[in-house]
Amino acid sequence: MSSPDVGVPYRNSFDTVAARGRCLTYRRRILDISQQVTALHVAPAFSCTEIVDTIYNGLMRWDTREASPDVFLMSKGHGCMIQYVILEERGVLSRADLDLYCKAGGRLGAHPDYGVPGIAASTGSLGHGMGLATGMALAERLQGRESAIYLVLSDGECQEGSTWEGAMMAANLGLDNLIAFVDLNDFSGLERMSEGHPAFHPLLDKFQAFGWEGVEVNGHAAEEIFEAVDQRGRGKPFVVVCNTVKGKGVSYMEHVPIWHYRSPSSEEYRQACDELAEVAR
Amino acid sequence: MRNKFADVFYELGRDDPKLCIVVADISPAGSIGKFRTEFPQRFINTGVAEQIMIGMCAGMAQRGLRPFAYTIATFTLYRPFEFVRDDLCYQELPVTIVGIGGGVTYSTLGGTHHAQEDIGVATAIPNMSVIAPCDPAEAEMATRWCATQTRGPVYLRLGKAGEPVLTDKAADPWRFGKLRYIERGEDVCILAYGPIMGLAVEIADRFRQRGDSVSIVSAHTVKPLDEEGIVDALRRHGRMVVIEETAPIGSLGPRIKAIAYDAGARCRVDSFSLRDEFIHHYGSHAELLAAHGLDAARIGHALGLS
């Protein structure tokens, strides 16, 4: 089998039914872990669950035996729970790692840390991912490797000037091995961005004005995310602006800012599990 | 100093395809221009965008390249500070950030272009090494070391251009992390780093004229500091004079005094630095240093040499 082109998904189809099943499992696993700690970024992980699942399970070549494995970079570091549970499922992280999440003796914190298996960079401070990813994508090209860099951004960090410094450079350099996904859940820490910062929208136009190609999709429809990347052109960095719901799948979490960080009580936990099961049916 | 850096970088970059230079809209000095012409893919200009200069260097290093970030010191260290801290130092990546015009080198450009607190700022960050060569020859040694080291990020603090060679007859070779005796004496130890070494040499002459035997030491590696070497120097000399072109808070002088206190050293230590103030003075570099109290007459007077 010949090696695929840069950034072209190596699977030519994506099983959306299987994806739904995985995302249910991931969300339930995150809820389970939330019962071990007082605070955990549940809602930010739920808004990008389908995005991260599609990257890991549909788009990325990340088998370490590959000559040029792709890179996953979680720029919205506070969404890392979804990355942790996928890495656990793949055996990159252990159950013991997840059991010690945010506990003494463990190696997983509320933001990803470089050096932990499967983690490409330390993030958490917003606005760093675009620069790191641009540097990585350039390094892959300069060294003649065919890796793609998959970058997950929050919408909030698209308010950081550094994100646009990087976006401009990535386009200047024509880095078409850089594929970014914006988790547009419309909530920054304080408020709805469409209300507090109406000029933030439309976001896709801004990326296009900076020399990117891109599309806007439903960020909870895995097939839309997959197809967007599958059908993209070449010569420019590519962005998928993903419209999402913060806390997706749990009624009392959806669009409610306090769930940015809070862990559910045991009663809330049971309700959340029931609702997720219902949605998946 | 920057031309020597450029010559050495060009020479090393010809042979090492992993060496890259990322600049933020600064005209490439000397041989860097040649490097740009011959290896355009490894010369990256981010434009007036310093955060991404540092961020890109981090990502490039994480994927196997060896990048140098290069611009005026205020813009490699201050403007992108949190990127230097998080992307380079927290992740412990072997990236060299070159700061041209450390201290108040750009004496006509005003305080916006003075990196007068750079030593305190850079040394405060965990994992950061700080190297400040005193002349073009030391700049060459430091550049060679930076191009092959694997320990982590380095702030390479350079002057500008035209600095004289002061170390051609140095008693010691240049070694990262070690004090370097340029001259060895017994009574007084003059310790400095960076281009202000020229002033340190003048002060050494004043002591000699008085009949003292003088050591002149380049503390080119400001971090990690050669504490053993400092203790040894404190024990071997009756008097130490520290001269540095940086803000007093976070500078070497107070550190050496602390080391002397902890070691129970009897050596007298006098230290001279920039003042803890922004001085609105435009003129030559020497004039601005003098406005901060750093000239041979003022230091000599303070040391009882006049």
Image: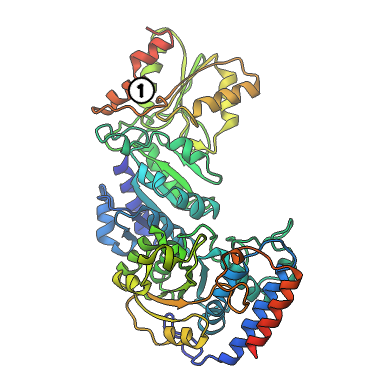
Residue at disc 1, secondary structure: loop
Give the quarter of the image for residue B209: top left
Query: Which x, y percent locates residue B254?
Result: 53, 25
Whether residue A77 sits left or right of residue B190 in the image: it is: right
Can residue A42 be seen at all in this image of the molecule? Answer: yes
Residue closest to the eye, B52 or B201: B52
Going by the numbered disc 1, the residue's amino acid type is His
Q: Residue at x 73, y 63 (%)?
A: A100
Query: Which x, y percent locates residue A238?
Result: 38, 76
> Which chain contains the residue that carries disc 1?
B
Up-down relation of residue B238 to residue A191 (above or below): above
Whether residue A103 sits left or right of residue B46 in the image: it is: right
Q: How many dots with numbers? A: 1
Can residue B19 be seen at all in this image of the molecule? Answer: no
Q: Residues within 10 Å of mark 1 (few under 14, many from 20)?
A: many
Residue closest to the eye, A65 or B184: A65
Give the quarter of the image for residue A258: bottom right
Q: Which residue is mark 1?
A: B292
Q: Residue at x 74, y 76 (%)?
A: A270
Query: Which x, y percent locates residue A253?
Result: 61, 72
Up-down relation of residue A133 to residue B297 (above or below): below
Query: Which x, y percent locates residue A281?
Result: 65, 91
Residue closest to the eye, A158 or B189: A158
Q: Residue at x 52, y 39 (%)?
A: B124
Q: What's the coloring here? A: rainbow
Whether residue A126 sits left or right of residue B24 in the image: it is: right
Q: Residue at x 70, y 79 (%)?
A: A273
Give the quarter of the image for residue B277: top left
